Each structure stands twice: as structure tokens, then as C-alpha cells.
Image (cartoon, coloured by chain):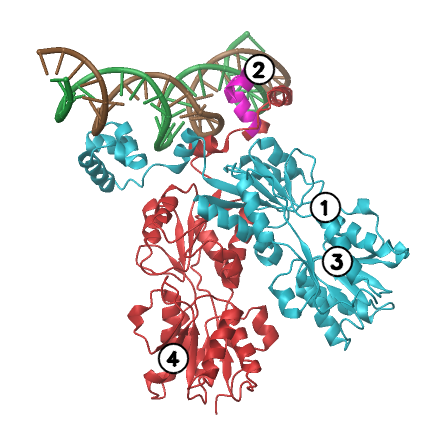
Chain colours: A cyan, B red, C green, D brown
DNA sequence: CAGCGCTTGTGTATCGATACACAACTAGAC
DNA sequence: GTCTAGTTGTGTATCGATACACAAGCGCTG
């Protein structure tokens, strides 16, 4: 820039104005400067230097609790991110995805990220990345995540929603199973009988499990009869294969509450493959009310992850809504569950 | 940082070393500095200042030719980005999505983006954003995009692949239709009869159309009989509704070559709804060989957008492979097309 | 004790731009 | 002719860190 100024015969300050506040400089001078810039192949003010001086980067950081590629593989994350992206586009701000690999480098990357704020997508209670985010002192928000680090949390009341959808899923059931997200970053596939809540390190998984369990025990049914099938990956394929195994097992489930529409869709496919009737032989519920749920006629919990993403983005950009909003949810009853009176 | 140095009774330089090269400083001093930092709530070296001095930001910029939210709605973009994300995670680099709205702000945002390189996802020939990317002088790469600005282009030979899949799709057909991506950013839904190639501003759309057309005319068939159905959105719903309209129209297609598996899936659904047999009444082909294609038994063009994304990322990070790699493709013949001899 | 290498702390210069206050000059008002 | 206001260009002082070269201290070798 210094060289451009010299070439155009003006001060560096004038060159700066040509780029950042063109109206501040005469048309004639501006033209001369632009010509000099072109001649020298000057690409315009360096964004880094500009950020340093201005104290603003123009980018929102999004931390994904899991491997970065999940953002694109997991439909729920995708819906959430679409909402974040909407707001970023409107505000003319970039969206930086911060990869997390589970290693110690994650913390450092968060500490060194050039962003104006953070949105953290569902993570586990012990994630040190959360501390790193809090330490930066930037505006930040956690989605459905652990609270307690002074960071605001956005998300629906998963426990209450789970309790309500559970009431419907468990109607007339004797061998209920929860098709669940992982309990912890380990992501092992396993089938548990009434696990201890303390074992569950992902708040989302924990809250939904608690809600579904409370719906089960509400009528005095034995807690131990409710099983938790942990799916390492959130997609239909995984839901299908795990359900197929369960159906072929000793105590085939007659009611399945899944933590996502994708897992539920897989369960439906497995049920169909096993020649079972839904909901007579086996009832199924999902979560999110996405396109898959609508197509399959799935009873599910409706919430807008997209709106929640937008909400998070606004908070992390330092433009929180005047009123604190609590995202809503409701249970959509369709054809995959038995009537309640049953 | 200056204050931390004073509080710890050392020079700023020492504080810098504590953070960036801890092995360079004695354990004792480092502890003292860290204590002072904690006492002053110093969040660690400012990433912006560090980037300025180091000349490296630690972030890869990804430009999407269309609205940012498409990244998450369009499964092809998602697969591609997953590959980009893989490499970013491995290299410990962030991934900044640059929103484009089609407005003039896009160019400026690219010019001001704090990134180390650019990956541009399929865009149209006239996109000024490409010039902005080229002007930055950073390592950059365009996927399946317009060439000619001195930027390297990555992508399969769409024309050749389209010609081969077309040969299969058109076997025994009399009323062929191409279910296509948009021709230009306008994204209007329309049905064209042998449009002029010059009208097609998206290189991907153009190359595939050319290939499919050449397959049609190869046997001396009249070019005008091949129609192009332009779908504004790349999803199954759109493919279904457009196909349904076509099947209900005056000249119902008996062969449909879609530019994505998603559009093709929609076409299959519409055919099923119309009570048509596949491939007897209508043949269908897709593109990409994604999960949907496998499940539907779709004849399709197999390519790995994920690998191509990874390849692009490596180039844009300035680590191009020693050997220039050309991504491969092949046609996978399944059950939705007629045998060739027909 | 000279000489060498290793560890550890410190100045200095610089990365590239912008905020701010000020100076020079042109117009128009009275 | 003088004063006020508006336009346009220019210094100066940072923004917050790091590369590099150098110096001091220390332990060893011969």
C-alpha cells in the first residue's frame, strides 16, 4: 500500500481512504490511485491488517463437537447450520467451521481462531473446547449443550418433549427400546438396560433419555424393562441395522422411540423387512419432524433446528434479540404409533 | 500482552515465546508468565495480530456459487464439502464459508476475506466473484467451473461421462428428456427443446447437456426431439413434480437422464405414482452414485465428489499433489435402464 | 583458564493498515 | 474583506504480536 501511495504521488492514508471510504476522496485522486494499484497488481487492503486495526474479523466461528465432516453427514447438524448460514449471509459475515478431532489440538485451534464469536453445536459435558471458548471472552452460545461455563445455552426442553413423545410411543408397549445418540465421544454401539444417567455425557442424549424413561415409569412400570440402544452414527442405515438385530433377538421390541427421524426411518425399514406391521406389531417415533418424518408418516417431535441456528448466530454475532426467545416444540402424532387409550 | 509481561517481570518477547514456543523458555519463567496471564485474564495471543505477523491465517475459504444455505441443502455440495472438511481437519485449518447472495457485496466479501486460499464450488461463467478470487493472488481452485481466469479447475470430464450414460439412457427411447440443473443464476423452471449451448451459463450443466445430446444425435436422431427440463432446485421433490407434469403432458417421456441422483429419485417416484414400469415404460439415469442411487437401483455416473473436494482443498492450501490427478468416473448400470441392444 | 556450545532472556524492527486531529484550500454569505 | 462551512489531503500514533540477532550465564573439555 505504501508503494501504491508513492506511485500515485499521494500519502498512504489517501490510498486507505480510496478503499475503505471512497466518498472521502476526490474522484480524480481515486482514479489515479486505482490506476497505480492496477499497475502494481496491488490486491487491495490486506484483510488481516485491517482486522487487527479495526478489531473485527467479519467471521463467525462454529465449533462442532465431533469430527468436522459430521456437519455435512448429519442431517440435524446440517439443518442447524443452514440457519446459522442464513444469518451470516444476511449480515455479510463469513462462517468458519472449526474442525475438532477429539485431540488436544482442538483447544488450541479454538484459542487461535480468528472469529468474532462462537456457536458451539451439541457437545459433551467434559469437552475442554468449551472452556477454551469461554476463555476467549467473545460472544458465544452453546446449542443444547452443557451449561455452567457462563455461556448461554439455546435449545428446547428436551426432557419435557421426550416425556410427551414417550407417553405416546410407549402406549400398549411391553418391550420398549430407545434408539439413541451416543452417550459419550467414544461412540460405541451398545445395548444397555436402564443405564445410569451419570454415564451419559451428551446433554441431549441424557435429557431425552430421562424424559423417555420418566414416561415409561410414570405408570409404575419397571425401569429395567426399558432398553437403550446406542447408535454410533445418526443415519437411517445405522437405525435399520440395529433395529434388525433387535428384532431378530430374544426380546424383539414392540415400541421404538428414536432420537432422530433418520434413526426412526431406519427402524421402519427394518420392521418392514421383518414383515411387521406398524404400529400394531411395533410402534415407532422420531424426532425433528424433517422431510423424512413427513414422508414416512412418522410420529415425531417437531422443532426448528434451522430457527435455532439462526438464533444462535445472532447471539454469537453480538446481536441478541431484545427478548430472550425460547424455541418451541410440539409432538406431531401420525401413523406410526398406537392410539393412547390402548 | 505487554501488561502480562510487566506483571510477570519479563519482556513481551518472553511472553510471546511462552505461547508460541514453550520449549524456548524455562519452565519456571513460563509458570510465572502463565500465572500473570491468569491473574490479568489474558486470553492468549490475539489471533489477528499473530496472523498479520506470520502471514498465514490458518483458514481455507470456500465460495459457493449460490446462496450459502445451498451448501447444506444440496447433497452434492455437501459431499464435496465433506471432502474439503476432511483435509482441513487433517491439516488443522479452519474452513470459512463465504456467503454469496448474488449481490455486489459478494465481490467485496471475497476481496476482504481473511483466508489462505480459495475453493470455488461450481459457478457460472460470468460470476464476478471469480475475478475477485483471481485478483487476490492466493492459491485457488475452481470445481467444475469456468476456466480461463488462470485458476486451476478440478472435475471429471462431464461431457464424456454424459455421452456414455446417455448412450444407455437413450436406448430404445423415442421421447427423451434431460432433467437438468439450472442454466443460469436465474433458476427458472422451464422446458426447452434443444436449447442453444450458449444460453447455458453453468459449465456443468452445459457439459452434461452436450454429452447427452451427442449421445442422442449419434445415431442420426433429430436433435430437436431431445428436451431439457430445467429444475431450479436439486432435490427429489423437484424432480418428482417436474416429471409428474411431463408424464401428464402431451409427449410423456420414455427416457429420463437426470443430472443428479436426487432428481432421478424424484423421477422414479413420479413414474411409480403414474403406474409406469421402469425401465420398460420409462428409463431413468442419475448422476453421482450416492446412497440414493444404490438404494433405488439406479443406473448412474459414479464419481467421488468427496475425493474431489479433498483434492481441491489440498490445492487451495498450497499443497498440490506431486502428480496432477484427474478424478475418475464410470457408469454404473443397474436396473433402471433398458439393455443396450434394444 | 581459554574456548566452545547450550540454554534463556531481551531489544529492535516490522507485519499492513486505519482513527483521529489537523492543515490547506475553495466557496459562498454578509 | 472577513468569516463560516465544506471538501480533501496528510502526519502521527497505534492495533498486538513475532523474526531475528544478540548477549548473558553456565557447565565442560583439555
Callout in the foreground (2, 1): 1
For label 3, the residue is A165
Q: Residues within 10 Å of mark 2 (few under 14, many from 20)?
A: some
Q: Residues within 10 Å of mark 1 (few under 14, many from 20)?
A: many
Residue B47 position (above or below residue A254):
above
Residue B91 position (above or below residue C24):
below
For label 4, the residue is B227
Instruction: Answer whether residue B50 is magenta in the image.
Output: no
Instruction: Label 2, secondary structure: give it.
Output: helix
Q: Position of residue B247 (x, y in %)?
A: 48, 83
For label 2, the residue is B7
Which segment is the magenta one? B1-19
Residue B248 position (above or below residue A34):
below
- Residue at (88, 59) in percent of width and height: A225
Q: Position of residue C4 (x, y in %)?
A: 52, 21
Residue A203, disc:
1
- Majority SS type along the magenta span: helix
Whether label 4 touches label 3, CB < 8 Å: no
Host chain of mark 4: B
Host chain of mark 2: B
Callout in the foreground (1, 3): 3
Separation of marks 4 and 3 at Cα, in angstroms: 48 Å
Host chain of mark 1: A
Q: Quadrant of residue A266?
A: bottom right
Instruction: Label 3, secondary structure: give it.
Output: helix
Separation of marks 2 and 4 at Cα, in angstroms: 76 Å
Q: Earlier in the sequence, mark 2 or mark 4?
A: 2
Residue B203 position (above or below residue A164):
below
Amino acid at each position: 500500500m505504501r508503494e501504491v501511495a508513492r506511485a500515485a504521488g499521494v500519502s498512504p492514508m489517501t490510498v486507505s481512504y480510496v478503499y475503505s471510504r471512497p466518498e472521502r476522496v476526490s474522484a480524480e485522486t481515486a482514479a489515479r490511485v486505482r490506476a497505480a494499484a492496477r499497475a502494481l497488481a496491488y490486491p487491495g487492503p490486506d484483510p488481516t491488517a485491517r482486522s487487527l486495526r479495526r478489531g473485527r474479523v467479519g467471521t463467525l466461528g462454529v465449533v462442532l463437537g465431533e469430527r468436522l465432516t459430521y456437519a455435512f453427514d448429519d442431517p440435524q447438524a446440517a439443518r442447524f447450520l443452514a440457519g446459522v448460514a442464513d444469518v451470516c449471509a444476511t449480515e455479510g459475515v463469513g462462517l468458519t467451521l472449526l474442525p475438532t478431532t477429539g485431540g488436544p489440538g482442538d483447544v488450541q485451534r479454538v484459542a487461535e481462531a480468528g472469529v468474532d464469536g462462537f456457536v458451539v453445536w451439541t457437545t459433551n459435558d467434559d469437552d475442554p473446547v468449551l472452556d477454551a471458548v469461554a476463555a476467549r471472552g467473545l460472544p458465544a452460545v452453546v446449542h443444547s449443550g452443557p451449561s455452567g461455563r457462563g455461556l448461554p445455552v439455546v435449545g428446547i426442553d428436551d426432557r419435557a418433549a421426550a416425556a410427551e413423545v414417550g407417553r405416546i410411543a410407549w402406549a400398549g408397549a411391553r418391550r420398549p427400546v430407545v434408539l439413541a445418540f451416543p452417550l459419550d465421544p467414544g461412540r460405541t454401539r451398545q445395548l444397555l438396560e436402564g443405564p445410569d444417567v451419570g454415564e451419559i455425557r451428551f446433554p441431549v442424549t441424557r435429557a431425552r433419555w430421562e424424559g423417555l424413561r420418566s414416561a415409561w415409569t410414570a405408570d409404575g412400570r419397571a425401569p429395567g424393562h426399558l432398553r437403550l440402544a446406542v447408535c454410533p452414527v445418526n443415519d437411517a442405515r445405522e437405525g435399520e441395522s440395529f433395529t434388525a438385530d433387535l428384532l431378530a433377538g430374544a426380546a424383539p421390541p414392540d415400541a421404538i422411540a428414536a432420537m432422530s427421524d433418520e434413526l426412526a426411518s431406519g427402524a421402519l425399514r427394518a420392521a418392514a423387512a421383518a414383515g411387521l406391521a406398524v404400529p400394531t406389531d411395533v410402534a415407532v417415533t422420531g424426532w425433528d419432524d424433517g422431510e423424512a418424518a413427513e414422508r414416512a408418516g412418522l410420529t415425531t417431535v417437531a422443532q426448528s433446528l434451522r430457527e435455532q441456528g439462526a438464533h444462535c448466530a445472532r447471539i454469537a454475532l453480538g446481536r441478541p434479540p431484545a427478548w430472550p426467545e425460547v424455541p418451541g416444540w410440539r409432538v406431531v402424532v401420525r401413523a406410526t404409533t398406537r392410539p393412547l387409550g390402548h
